[in-house]
Image (cartoon, rainbow, N blue to C red):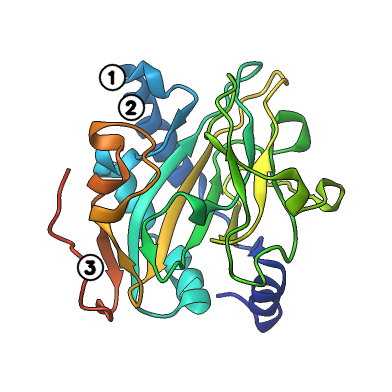
């Protein structure tokens, strides 16, 4: 469980790194599932935006009681998991993730999501760890983004440089099994991995069911077919669908 201090830090700064750590047995199962995915889909060797569309074994990680408990403390007891991604960042070739807000991509109304970011390997400044701008979520609005189609980027939208001061960035350094939790409006990104060590990270995207995932209104597609935001399956993790509008029947 998160302490009162940790919960206050999350709401004030937009992120938290709890004391909790996943056991090595679960990390091994994630690595194994990712290896199976890459064997079948080599195109995801660096980044896969929709793990659950290809292997629901990753769904079991989303059901981890300790993670669900912490997320519930932050966004309420009625929780849906709508996506999971994998940022592999292989040694020397791992791509850069430009500064962005997650909500710029997602068809969720009202916009609300808590992301759990799981370190599969050590995540350090040397191999491109997550960076955040503390407190950048506070006005709960989306800043201006620009499309950036340069090579070597994991995502195509980038925050306008005038929207923030990069010198305020904080590195989220994690050991294998540690997680961080961050708000949908938080400014964040990561550098490319130029080190000799991989930096694998898995994300779980949870939303309160007072929000609705609008399949028909996905505005920023990240790919065709199973990767398209309009085709994501939504999973009820705990409680009830408080909105009464989420479609949990849509399957890939």
Image quadrant in which the C terminus is located: top left
Residue 185 position by quadrant: bottom right
Q: Which mark is residue 51?
A: none
**Vertical order, 91 against 156 (above or below):** above
Image check: 111 left or right of 6? left
Measured in 3D between alpha carbons, the distance from the residue under mark 1 to the one under mark 3, in whole angstroms, is 31 Å
Marks 1/2: CA–CA distance: 5 Å
**In this rendering, which labeled residue sits more in front, label 3 or label 2?**
3
Residue sitting at x 73%, y 46%:
173
Up/down of 61 relative to 247, above or below:
above
**Which image quadrant for residue 56?**
top left
Question: Which one is nearer the viewer's eye here, 225 or 122?
Answer: 225
Residue at 71 percent of width and 80 percent of height? 5
Which residue occupies the foreground of this view, 182 or 19?
A: 182
Asked whether the viewer can see residue 157, the reply is yes
Q: In the image shown, does 35 or 204 lie closer to the viewer?
A: 204
Q: Position of residue 106 (x, y in %)?
A: 41, 53
Residue occupied by mark 2: 37
Q: Which mark is residue 40?
A: 1
Alpha-carbon span between mark 3 and mark 2: 28 Å
Quadrant position of the N terminus in the picture: bottom right
State left or right for residue 220 relative to residue 55: right
User: In the drawing, does residue 71 fall left or right of residue 180?
Assistant: left
Question: Residue under circle 3?
Answer: 246
């Amino acid at each position: 469980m998160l302490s009162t201090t940790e919960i206050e830090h999350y709401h004030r700064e937009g992120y938290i790194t709890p004391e909790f750590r996943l056991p090595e047995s679960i990390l091994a199962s994630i690595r194994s599932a990712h290896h199976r995915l890459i064997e079948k889909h080599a195109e995801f060797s660096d980044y896969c935006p929709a793990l659950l569309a290809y292997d629901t074994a990753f769904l079991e990680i989303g059901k981890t009681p300790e993670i669900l408990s912490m997320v519930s403390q932050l966004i309420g007891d009625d929780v849906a998991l709508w996506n999971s991604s994998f940022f592999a960042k292989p040694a020397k070739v791992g791509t850069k993730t430009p500064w962005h807000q997650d909500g710029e991509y997602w068809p969720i109304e009202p916009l609300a999501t808590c992301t759990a970011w799981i370190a599969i390997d050590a995540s350090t400044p040397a191999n491109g760890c997550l960076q955040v701008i503390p407190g950048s979520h506070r006005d709960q609005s989306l800043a201006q983004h620009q499309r950036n189609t340069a090579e070597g980027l994991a995502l195509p939208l980038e925050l306008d440089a005038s929207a923030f001061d990069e010198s305020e960035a904080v590195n989220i350094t994690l050991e294998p099994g540690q997680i961080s939790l961050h708000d949908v409006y938080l400014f964040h990104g990561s550098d490319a991995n130029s080190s000799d060590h991989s930096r694998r990270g898995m994300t779980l995207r949870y939303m309160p069911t007072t929000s609705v995932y609008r399949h028909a209104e996905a505005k920023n597609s990240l790919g065709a077919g199973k990767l398209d935001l309009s085709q994501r399956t939504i999973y009820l993790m705990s409680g009830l669908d408080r909105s009464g509008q989420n479609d949990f029947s849509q399957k890939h």
